[in-house]
Image (cartoon, rainbow, N blue to C red):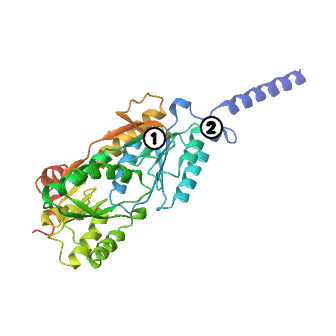
């Protein structure tokens, strides 16, 4: 009888121990090895920026990350600091990490086709943000109508320069495909006008000081010009500095894009003719929403397509807005992009 009793106790202890080990969280490593059902996993997004030298990029990052977080996604942000090889390494890291999607603001729009293919082979969506990645067949390109940006710059100069006037043109980085798109729009208008581009330069890696040097050299070379077209407002700030040193800031018409605060201040002061405002909050919010929907398997219908020199890729195209002294209060201040006291800081 004692033997039977002992056997029964042993069996009860064994059963109790087995039940204990099946309770979630009990036993070594049970909680750590348990995976969430696939439908409940947080979407993981890798985001690689060219750099934060341009004022707007931090706005893009903040809105994208906050919107994605509200939708239940996690975003890992990396900054390439203008180094194309560093950006490739960052995307490689995202692939190894097993993210669901990669959003990239390309340093070199022609240098990422290989790494995009590697991401696609790993089952990862790739979204080209603001700048088109060439020959890569990205899953989506989301940006503004960059050709229209150039068109608006040219139209402002045509309307405000004397007939037969000369323009100094300082475009952005030659590795940024947006620059080529804006150039097309700019050239198409200028070619139909009486204005002349007397010098065309580019700013590698969007280095703002390039504009300062170009303007100074043009003046030293004896060129006369009535307007300066800059690829963005960061370049325009340096062009303005050079013009100011030669006491030409009020006479030469200056145009740019991005609606940087300094540019908006110059517009109300009368030393910059116009800027092109691109509602980056709308762009970043829409990009985050589309990326999360894409990860969750929803079908995305882009507004149009664009040719990346090899493939026609989906293109979600947003509209830019020309900002001048006439509409800056309505567009920039009432729209909440900059505060009135900031824009009119030097006018009070």
- Chain-order first, disc 1 or disc 2: 2
The image position of residue 127, as x and y in percent, is 46, 42
User: Residue 211's image quarter?
Assistant: bottom left
Q: Residue at x 41, y 42 (%)?
A: 68
Label 1 packing within 10 angstroms: few (<14), some (14-19), many (20+): many
Give SS at disc 2: loop
Q: Is residue 180 above or below residue 55?
A: above
User: Residue 31's image quarter?
Assistant: top right
Q: Is residue 346 above or below residue 259?
A: below
The label shown at residue 25 is: 2
State which quarter of the image contains the N terminus: top right
State the residue position of label 1: 73
Give SS at disc 1: loop
Q: Is residue 198 above or below residue 115?
A: below
Label 2 packing within 10 angstroms: few (<14), some (14-19), many (20+): few
Q: Is residue 271 left or right of residue 297?
A: left
Q: Which circle, 1 or 2, is nearer the viewer?
A: 1
Q: CA distance from mark 1 to mark 2?
A: 26 Å
Q: Is residue 292 visible?
A: yes
Name the residue nearer the viewer: 271 or 28.
271
Instruction: Confirm or deny contact between disc 1 and disc 2 (CB under 8 A).
Output: no
State which quarter of the image contains the C terminus: bottom left
């Amino acid at each position: 009888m004692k033997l039977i009793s002992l056997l029964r106790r042993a069996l009860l202890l064994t059963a109790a121990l087995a039940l204990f080990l099946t309770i979630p969280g009990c036993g070594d490593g049970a909680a750590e090895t348990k995976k969430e059902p696939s439908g409940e996993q947080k979407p993981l997004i890798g985001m690689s920026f060219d750099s934060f030298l341009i004022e707007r990029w931090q706005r893009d990052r903040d809105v994208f990350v906050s919107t994605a977080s509200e939708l239940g996604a996690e975003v890992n942000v990396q900054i390439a600091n203008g180094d194309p090889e560093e950006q490739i390494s960052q995307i490689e890291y995202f692939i190894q990490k097993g993210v669901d999607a990669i959003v990239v603001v390309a340093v070199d729009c022609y240098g990422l086709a290989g790494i995009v293919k590697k991401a696609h082979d790993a089952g990862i969506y790739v979204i080209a943000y603001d700048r088109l990645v060439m020959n890569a067949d990205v899953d989506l390109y989301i940006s503004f109508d960059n050709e229209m940006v150039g068109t608006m710059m040219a139209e402002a100069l045509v309307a405000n320069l004397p007939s037969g006037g000369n323009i100094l043109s300082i475009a952005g980085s030659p590795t940024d495909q947006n620059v080529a798109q804006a150039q097309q729009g700019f050239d198409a208008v200028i070619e139909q006008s009486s204005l002349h581009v007397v010098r065309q330069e580019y700013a590698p890696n969007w280095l703002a000081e390039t504009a300062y040097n170009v303007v100074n050299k043009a003046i030293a070379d004896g060129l006369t010009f009535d307007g300066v077209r800059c690829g963005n407002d960061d370049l325009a700030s340096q062009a303005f500095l050079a013009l100011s040193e030669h006491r030409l800031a009020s006479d030469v018409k200056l145009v740019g894009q991005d609606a940087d605060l300094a540019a908006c201040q110059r517009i109300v002061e009368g030393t910059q003719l116009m800027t092109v405002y691109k509602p980056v909050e709308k762009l970043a919010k829409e990009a985050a929403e589309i990326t999360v929907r894409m990860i969750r398997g929803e079908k995305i219908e882009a507004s149009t397509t664009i040719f990346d020199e090899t493939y026609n890729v989906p293109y979600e195209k947003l509209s830019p807005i020309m900002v001048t002294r006439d509409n800056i209060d309505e567009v920039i201040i009432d729209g909440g992009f900059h505060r009135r006291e900031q824009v009119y800081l030097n006018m009070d």
